[in-house]
Image: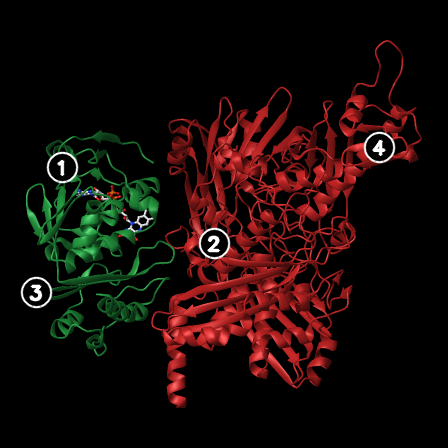
Chain colours: A green, B red
Amino acid sequence: MKTFNYHSTKDVKEATKLASSSSAFLAGGMTTIPSMKLGLASYKDIIDIKRIKKLSGIKVSAKSVTIGSTTKHVEVANSKEVKKALPSLSALAEGIGDPQVRNRGTIGGSIANNDPSADYPSACIALNATIHTNNRKISADKFFTGMFETSLKKGELIEAIEFQIPEKSCYQKYPNPASRYAIVGVYVAKHKSGVNVAVTGAKSCVYNEKNISNALSKNFSASSIDNVVVSSSGINSDIHASAEYRANMVKVFAKKAVEAC
Amino acid sequence: MASLVGSRVERKEDKKLLTGRGKYTADVTFAHQTYAYFVRSPHARAQIKNVDISKAVKASGVVSVLTGKDIVNDKIGGLIAGWRIKSEDGSDMKVPPHPPLASESVNYVGDHVAVVIAESLDEARNAAELVKVDYKVLKAVVKTDEAMKSDNIYKDIPKNLCFDWLLGDRAKVKEAFDKADKIIKIDLINNRLIPNAMEPRAANADYNPSTEEITLYTTSQNPHLARIIISAFNGVAPENKLRVIAPDVGGGFGSKIYPYAEEVVCSWAAKKIERPVKWVADRTESFLSDCHGRDHVTHAELAVKNDGTFLGFKNETIANLGAYASVFGTVTPTYLFGPCATGVYKMPAAYSNVKAVYTNTAPVDAYRGAGRPEATYTIETLVEKAARELGMDPAEIRMKNFPTQFPFQQTLVHSVDSGDYVGGLKKAMEVADYKGFEKRKRDSASKGKLRGIGLCSYFEACGIAPSPVVMMLGCGIGLWESAEVRFNPTGNVTVFTGSHSHGQGHDTTFAQIAADQLGVPIENIEISHGDTDKGPFGYGTYGSRSLTVGGTAIVKACDKIVAKGKKVAAKMLEVSESDVEFKDGEFIVAKSNKKKTIGEIAFACYLPGTYGEVKSPLPEGEEPGLKETSFFDPVNFSFPAGSHICEVEVDPDTGKVELVKYTAVDDFGTIINPLVVEGQVHGGLAQGIGQALHENCHYDDSGQLVTASYMDYTMPRADNFPNFELGFTCTPATSNPLGTKGCGEAGAIAAPPTVMNAVMNAIGTEISMPATAEKVWKACQKMKKANSEAA
Ligand SMILES: Cc1cc2nc3c(=O)[nH]c(=O)nc-3n(C[C@H](O)[C@H](O)[C@H](O)COP(=O)(O)OP(=O)(O)OC[C@H]3O[C@@H](n4cnc5c(N)ncnc54)[C@H](O)[C@@H]3O)c2cc1C
């Protein structure tokens, strides 16, 4: 690992002021530290944001669940309030990686990183989330812009993620057997305004599978997915799963999700 | 005193290992320590045109940078192939040079080119980036079944063929096949695996310039072998000037049997720079450069009669050796594979023909089971297919062909001393509720799941030994084992063994044996291994040999202690030796009930005098001290056997295979400690199931290792397994006094065909390992299509 300066920050202002083009925020470190150790990334400044109290915690209202950016996966998985208001979200958190990862990894780190097979981005899309940063609010459909890319500006800090509580929802994931990231993850959420079917793992970036969303908006039942065609073009192919298989699993897991709603 | 053999004594070593008090090679740091980082080839195949170290030597903290040229200049010998195999045409195997640091060519991604030694690991690693190697990249040979048709990697080795070996009689096989009612054929791939010991390999060598001694700490299953190879073949230091210590070792599974380039280089470099040199592999290096396992492409045929009787067997295999012939790389796909490929059956005629090929991949060597998993997978999937094609029950066809008379002369090599294959399979069927399967299958079907059942009956040859036999077959070393039993003056005992424990629980099992033999409480017995300066030469741990060979050496050494003790007791008790009996730690004179404890005898042996008079407790001519050594070379291998049954549920929509039930009934002969044995079975099963369902080493066409981390290489995890149901039968081995047979590898040998037979039974078609969800899903789709077309 290359040497770097470590800063432990107390508030958002201090953290964002230190940020530069060669810095990274340190939340759970589950992505940042391995990439530094493997020599895939190096930074001049590492800005630890875990001690900023304001960034951590869960707030539930009648309409939404708001989660602070440094809240760990294990906290979301175990939260009684989330389990009650939005059980699909706590179930998603419980299915991330392994206990070590869940005990350190954070929601803010996960969506800032926007790994194409991460779980949380699908929740953001399905649950019409709003990303609150230190200087603006970004709606989820504008946030995830590409593989490992978001609309965050350099040094912009995610403070919280606000999820809309739907009528019904369910997340179904086919985990990569090695890493346990999603080979395909499908988040189905039925809102008053319509159904969102967010898919992760299948393409270079999370997306709303409009064909299935539309079919379900018309008729919210597993059988209405049967005749939807999910094309394998643009779908990822690697040693773990071909595009053909992934495309089929999008449908299979969407059905499973609807059935389990 | 109750016998400890057979009881579930808790593992003595676990307190240390589970509380972080183990001492591993990486925990050893010397004064004036330096750190090594290896420059490795990023290419699968290339010529080295130039290595420029000028920038690296000037980098911060760098002590020395050494390259292949230095190896040549210092006349350091290459790594060796330890087993000589001849081809069918009588020619010797062809082995390319394997220098510890390459100077002319690199032959797999991860091959060693240079080493940077610095004051800290970070400095060594940073400077390694400054070593500029000028490569001429060549087209890599990657695939096992294409190696013979590809460019020659080494100019003197045509078709990349190391040897083309035959065991068996082609003419007799032809005769048998001509008489057959039916010939069952199968094409198999035995997938390449990466061992993944929990502790990565490591070496730390210290050199003392005034005594000229090197002390090498290393992660070895076999420190004595490391010493003899590094001395006699690499020529780093004479044997008496090289001490090798393998302290606690965190797993090996075969990958740590022999020394690698890194240990040789650290020892040599420590002498050169006169400072200790430490190297600890990071996980990526482990993936790239630990020897891998398996990697066979096999075509096999079984000639049968319509009633299911086996007439003959053919096995045509291409085995991938990787880029170099590793120490046991050549025996693994031959003598450890070929003989066992006829399985646990009467097989009137058989041959195994193995072509071993070089490719631009990491060397392949023994990995838990070494050859026997490949053999068992071949015959057991073939037998299952025969049952399917003949419309017979898979248990019935097996029963029909089991030998029932022992000793049983197996077709290709082995004379199997004992066994009860029929009893084993019957017991497995009972434990697994074989009869109830059809109902469970219907229950699964009602949930939309396909349920399958799979069987495997195996035997294997382990307890790897008789030296004259293995040396006749080409082994470069003997395979006996040693023990030294040393009483301390106060009556407790240290047992030195030439084998090595790297997780198997020898500290407990061996102490149980010594406790029973000597009548000394187990707490008073210490097992010592892993240090060439302590105890006699030995051959280490692999091939499920430690207990049958090494444990027997302990028994024999204890016998000698008791024999001497009897003489001393007789003198002390003033009776004749024949009047003394030894039982439960006491030398007793039956007539008078006079006795001496073995502790008193030990004391007397070390303090042989009496206050106030000149009187020795030792008989005339008897030397003081109480310490005996034994070197045990058994007359035969040992032959564990068993039957495993597994049930899977397949989700046809996703292809996911769930292992719902796994039964293993094994015959390991006498069981010393059931707790330890069950642990060994569980571990072996996890590895075998890993091979069947999860693990796969994948190189791309250019020879880059795609599965070089846990993000891509699927290690099985606890939640991938059901509770294993274990059972045992026991026919003691006759080749050693304990009657033990070895249990370390059985799980990894039996599980792959058991699981695959279940998967294939569920989906109704053949499929290769690992049975990943996508493969199974595709097979289900194919079957669905075929069924609907048929209907
Ligand atoms: C073995 C393993 C398995 C995993 N499995 C899964 C899985 O199954 N599913 C899954 O979804 N994920 C998985 N992950 C990812 C994990 O869940 C983490 O969420 C992820 O690694 C990043 O979160 P972190 O808190 O560790 O971020 P860090 O590593 O600390 O940071 C990652 C990046 O995000 C930026 N960042 C962090 N916080 C903020 C913020 N508040 N505002 C702006 N930028 C920020 C940092 O600058 C950095 O660039 C796995 C990780 C590992 C190591």
Q: Mark on residue A192?
A: 3
A157 horizontally vs B71: left or right? left
Q: How many marks?
A: 4
Q: Is mark 1 within 8 Å of ligand 1?
A: no
Compare marks 4 and 2 and give the one earlier in the sequence: 2
- Indicate the chain on which mark 3 is placed: A
Task: Using the numbered discs, state the Cα–Cα distance from disc 3 to disc 2 in whole angstroms.
Answer: 61 Å
Amino acid type indicated by mark 2: Arg
Instruction: Read off the residue under disc 1.
Output: A54
What residue lies at 45% left-to-right and 51% top-to-bottom? B109
In this rendering, the label closer to the viewer, 1 or 2: 1
Pinpoint residue B671: horizontal percent, then vertical percent. Answer: 66, 50
State the residue in front, B151 or A56: A56
In this rendering, the label closer to the viewer, 1 or 3: 3
Amino acid type indicated by mark 1: Lys
Quadrant including the N terminus of chain A: top left
Instruction: Read off the residue under disc 4.
Output: B588
In this rendering, the label closer to the viewer, 4 or 1: 4
Pinpoint residue B236: horizontal percent, then vertical percent. Answer: 62, 34
